[in-house]
Amino acid sequence: MADLFEDYRLGPGWDEMFGEPSMPRPTYEALHATLQPLSSAELGIRAEVLARAFLDQGITFALKGVERPFPLDIVPRIIAAQEWRTVEVGVAQRIRALEAFLDDVYGAGQVLADGVVPRRIVVTSAHFHREAAGINPHNGVRIHVAGVDLIRDEQGTFRVLEDNVRVPSGVSYVMENRRAMAHVLPEVFAATRIQPVESYPGQLLRALRAAAPVGVHEPTVVVLTPGVHNSAYFEHALLAREMGVELVEGRDLVCVGNEVAMRTTAGEQRVDVIYRRIDDEFLDPVHFRADSVIGCAGLLNAARAGRVTIANAVGNGVADDKLLYTYVPDLIRYFLNEEPILPNVETHRLDDDPDVLEHVLDHLDELVLKPVDGSGGAGIVIGSQATDEQLAAVRERIEFDPRGWIAQREVALSMVPTLVGNRLRARHVDLRPFAVNDGENVWVLPGGLTRVALPEGALVVNSSQGGGSKDTWVLTETPGAAEPEPPEEAPIVVVPSPRSPDPGPVAGPVAVQQQQQQQSARSGRPPAATSQRSAREAQC
Amino acid sequence: MLSRIAESLYWIGRYVERAEDTARILDVHLHRMLADPWVDEQTACRSLLGVMGVSLAESPGASDPRGEATSIEGPVSAARVVGLLGLDEHNPSSVVGALAAARENARGARETVSSEMWETLNATWHGLPDARRRVEQQGVHAFFRWVRERCSVLAGLTDATMSRDEGWLFLVLGRSVERVDMTARLLSTHVRAGGSIPSWLTLLRSCGAWETYLRTYRGSLDDRHAAEFLLLDRLFPRSVFAALSTAESCLAELEPDHSRAGVTTDAQRIVGRSRTNLEFRGADELMADLGSVLAGLERTCSQVNDAVSRRYFRQTSAVLWVSEAVA
């Protein structure tokens, strides 16, 4: 019975599962065939188990101070291998360009001198930190971890919505979603060959160790968290656990003479690489907010002295400023001499051309307005869904500070079936792939976080705006056909087969019945406890 | 303490550990088959069945001590593995069978095990008919997790409510012997597959050792360290070495009269030899010869089992009654 897909309507965006009504695209055929026979009640039970598992494991997200589970939708999102290839290459290209850009603006500034990016854009960015000038990581990596937000437009083309090169979060959900889905919906997995995502912590640790200061052979890596009240604390703990490194808070660290150490029961222990999940402003009260109690005084100077590596580097925020975003295609051409693989979304800059500003102000109700330094979907105004008061308010703020805003075309994000109530409905999704740069190449985790806007028609998918997530499956190169590359064949060692487990004195319930029924009849086998007891009973 | 009671306690320890370890191993291996696109289900299932000593050619549960596990016929699916090793109630080595057998042993020793322990085992046993339904509705993972939890509850209650007398020693002895056996079996899945499948990650996860391992070796995953950890680690309670040491100290305490030369019992000799054989060989040496080391460990377990049974449970030969004579 097909009641799950009953009344399923294709929405305004590119539907990833269906090309035509009831006609799944090839990548989704296996999934569709598995879901089709399930009744909504069955899927409902699984969804409950899934939700329960997340709550039990503490996979939560703090929203406005309240800890709540990050809803995981039970229908996965599938990306074909060749589509993923584009994403992978495109994301890596972007990261390489942004690395070059950061190196330049915190160094020689050639890109500014050549006028590719106006100097004022950089120096007026809220996250451009002069304090970071002259800190040169020895393996050239400032963006150890990046999360690039992608969407698929009405034609199904992947486009970049924004870059996150400060402290991108969400990768823990990628890993946990996969684990939970495999536990709850194993039958769907059996039909599909999906690239695993669990190597992420290993890759991250490798990149962090590679970034260690010169001359340190066995670097000590730590994860620096603001503490349990941070909305992503769960993720910090997960990464530290899966990397096998210490999860420290600012108060656990001490910095003396440009050496950073953590306080342990065995005295102070030197720290070489800090994967920090604290914003720049709170990291080092010496240079930034003096009232920060979650950072550690002196970190930045230690980094400048090359005694400790901070990952991601301080000052990266200038590269994910949303106004700079509009220049990234130019940066790719300038630094890499390549054409951008992933296009941007059409975006208007409001600060340099009065005509553009005027045009935008006239069409506020058709555009999406974003503050340039916002994150987590805060402050975004979607013209078509905003009230007149909201539009008036945003107009006032844009007129006051055109540098602080960008305007984008309203893209109808692609849609994936999502369990709403007891039916599947099309909902808008985006995708955040995670990239890890170890200095030699940029590795992109095959998967990424798919966020889904749960309310009907909603376009803002951020978890802080009440979005949910989906497990994201990247198929292996040749779906169906077996192993592209079986692990190398080691010589088969001949080992004697393990024997059956030792049998106990009472060999299971059967023997018990025998014991009850056959107190006199002797079986030839030697369960001595049984026969001794029978003998005693018989003597009584 | 009555031999019969001692034997029951010993087997409660063994069966509960067997249930828990089997649940852990199945859970991780089945999850692995799904999550890793490069694992071939047939091969993985066969290797798993083989290592757990299930031979499909014969009737399941037939405990031929020389049971060669290579003669499996017919397609083996993950579901069949769950059926055989998880839910088969007639096989005391399956999860369900082992829990039932543990409860049966506790029933015969109710006055010795604390009532809380008995209640836990009994409640678990009563929960078993639900197991199949649980597997169907919520997937195998939910079932295995439930088993792990029940076993942990029992371990906790044992720890909290049993006095550290002979009974306790027998129970812990049984648990430790079983642990050695299961870890050795688990490691031999790896060796038998030519050292590639299942990965060390799977093995470490199966023992619940993944996170401690990462913490110990700071995330560097290679064969030598992983084997060293599972075989030799002094601090991780599921390593072969730790389990052997525990068994050894139990045996030593059971024999309060120290003789002036060596140790008193066969069991002590067997366990001690096995322990020193691990302890005083380097990890590299062990790795080079892993196959025979593991086979040796499995032999050790059976020998200890026999020695303990002879020494403590069947000191006199069983009286054989002929029913006509009684009548």
Image (spheres, helix red, strand yellow):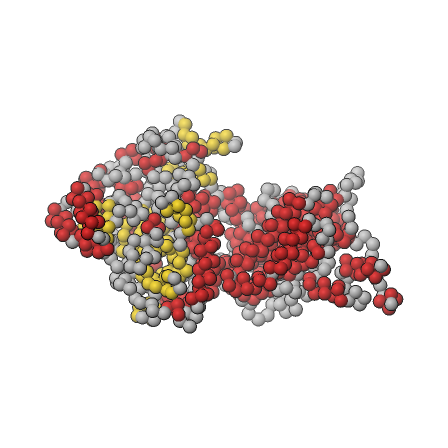
In percent of width and height, residue B85 lies at 60, 62
Question: Going 66% across and 45% down the picture, which residue do you hit?
Answer: B161
Horizontal relation, residue B166 to residue A74: left or right = right
**Quadrant in the rendering for residue B263:** top right
In percent of width and height, residue A411 lies at 24, 57
Determine the residue located farthest toward the top in the rendered image. A257
In percent of width and height, residue B326 lies at 87, 65
Looking at the image, residue A155 lies above or below residue A113:
below
Question: Going 60% across and 61% down the picture, which residue do you hit?
Answer: B128
Which quadrant is the N terminus of chain A positioned in? bottom left
**Quadrant in the rendering for residue A75:** bottom left
Question: Going 57% across and 52% down the picture, which residue do you hit?
Answer: B149
Question: Going 26% across and 47% down the picture, which residue do you hit?
Answer: A379
Residue B21 in sight from this viewpoint: no
Residue A49 in sight from this viewpoint: yes
Which quadrant is the C terminus of chain A positioned in? bottom right
Q: How many marks?
A: 0
Considering depth in this image, is B211 or B89 the residue closer to the camera?
B89
